[in-house]
Image: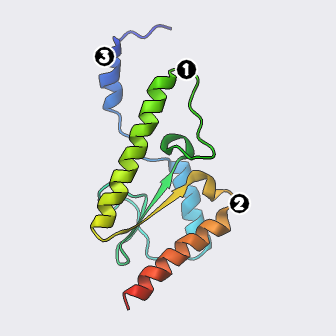
Amino acid sequence: MADVFSPQLRSAIMGKIRGAGNVSTEKRFVRLLRKHRFSGWRRGIPLFGRPDFVWRQERIALFVDGCFWHGCPIHANIPASHKKYWTEKLARNSRRDREVTRNLRRDGWTVIRVWECALSRKNEERTATRVARALKRVRDCSR
């Protein structure tokens, strides 16, 4: 079926849509945090870049990046149709991620970025260890 809106109007309409995050991926990460008994984390903290999980006291901001939307070097694949659009879109996402990380680090935050694929059963232990090390490093430095 043909689109009833002009490309410009469709773009304006789509541009007003704001995502609420990838709920299923975030829920998997919540299960990982609970399984490994991590505490002190919160979600929905109004911080630059809108991290998925925040440990305020430790000043750790954690992002769970979807493999497609954030360009995982292993699992991202650019759709064959509209290849130019998707290449540019994913490059903008990557630039924004780097900018967010830079700004938070400049403001004294430790930033952790976890790929969606790191939440698989095979990679879960490694991911939990990575988070635990970051928490330990920050907590040891604040003593």
| Image quarter of residue 58 | bottom left
Foreground: disc 3 or disc 1 = 1
Tell me the crowding category of disc 1: few under 14, some 14 to 19, or many 20 or more residues within 10 angstroms, Cα based: few
Q: Which residue is mark 1?
A: 81
Q: Residue 138 vs residue 38: left or right?
A: left
The quadrant of the rendering that contains the C terminus is: bottom left
Q: Residue 126 vs residue 114: left or right?
A: right
Residue at 39 percent across and 39 percent down: it is 92
Residue 51 picture location, percent across and down: 39, 58
Residue 75 picture location, percent across and down: 63, 43
Q: Residue 77 vs residue 42: left or right?
A: right
Q: Which residue is mark 2?
A: 121
Q: Could you tell me the amino acid type at mark 2?
A: Arg
Q: Could you tell me the amino acid type at mark 3?
A: Gln
Residue at 71 percent across and 60 percent down: it is 121
Q: Could you tell me the amino acid type at mark 1?
A: Ser
Secondary element under disc 2, as helix, strand or loop, is loop
C-alpha separation, residue under disc 2 versus residue under disc 3: 43 Å
Tell me the crowding category of disc 2: few under 14, some 14 to 19, or many 20 or more residues within 10 angstroms, Cα based: few
